[in-house]
Amino acid sequence: MQNIVIVGAGAMGCLFAARLVEADVDVTLVDVDRQRLALLNSDGIVLSDDDGERVIPVRAAVASDVAGPVDLVMLFTKGMHSVAAIRSVAHLADGHAHGLTLQNGIGNAEIIAEIFTPNRVLMGVTDLPSDLVGARQVHSHGQGHIRLGGMTADAHSAANPVAALLNRGKLQAEADPVILVAIWEKAAFNAALNAMATITGLTVGGMDEEPGRRIAGAVASEVVNVAAAKGIRLDRGRIDAKIAFALANHRNHQASMLQDRLAGRPTEIESINGAIVAAAELLGLSAPTTATLADMVRLIEASDLRHRGSDDGSTTS
């Protein structure tokens, strides 16, 4: 695999693009912001990581300007933009290219599969640190990993080659034959902490009190039960350990969902808590704590939207 398209020029998209370009991989970074794309094309990505700071030249374009064939399309948008983003590169789904999602939440692989077919879809998780500063600077300090696998057995045959490609860019990837476990365990972690942070405005450390730990534990239990009903056996102890580690060691960190709310952006609540509740309902189960957190974030988003509309002089009904 050599010809890669990365859809979404956020922190992760820019990090992966920069690292892969450094490894002499042919990468095109796709986004919808033409002004920012022009800046990336002219000035490159400023990558700051444990190896220092340097400028990485990058090719960036809108989706309609990208021609195939390509080997791999990586989706790095927020979950609420997945449908539009993957449809924008549907012309690259030629039966040869694979699609890969490392996004947060549940359901992104299924969205890609509507265009690329399940036998060409890879999915996974990553905890690589990445922060976008301004329009073109990415900070990534510390260690992280990628786990990925196929949506089907046929798709999984590409997992090792894709992991090898990512490792050329020092991205610490490995194939995982039971990737749904990793995806659902990360969803449990995010559902437990992100929505609570968004509602309260607290940093991760601020939730390290008995009410916060109790709420997080209730969400974890609900996600484990839903996954089990789907035939996915999660390790509850591993989820609890990740939550406890974050509460103790990431005390000043603002959850990404809270960052989105504070910046006036839509959150990924539907891809995380909302998707878990939807999966529970399809199975005839309930996930009351997860559902309540989702509804509270929806209320907050609706209120924020009304206030922004009022500030802009518009009216709502």
Image: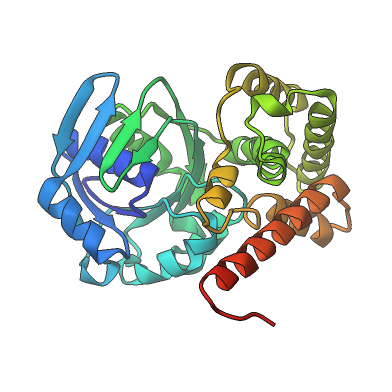
Q: Is residue 185 above or below residue 107?
A: above
Q: Nearer the viewer, residue 241 or 99?
A: 241
| Left or right of residue 34, residue 77 in this image | right
Number of callouts: 0
Residue located farthest toward the left when viewing the structure as drawn: 42
Residue displayed at 43% across by 43% down: 157
Q: Tell whether 271 sits left or right of 102.
A: right
Of residue 140 and residue 115, the one placed in the foreground of this image is: 140
Looking at the figure, which quarter contains the N terminus? top left
Vertical side of 67 occupied by 41: above or below? above
Q: Can see residue 2? A: yes
Residue at the image point whose x is 57% and y is 72% from the top: 309
Is 28 or 157 nearer to us in this picture?
28
Q: Position of residue 150 (x, y in %)?
A: 50, 46
Is 256 situated left or right of 47 in this image? right
Confirm whether residue 239 shows in the render: no
Where residue 22 sits: x, y (%)? 17, 34
Figure check: 19 above or below 77: above
Which residue lies at the image location 58% right of the left edge and 51% below the top edge? 261
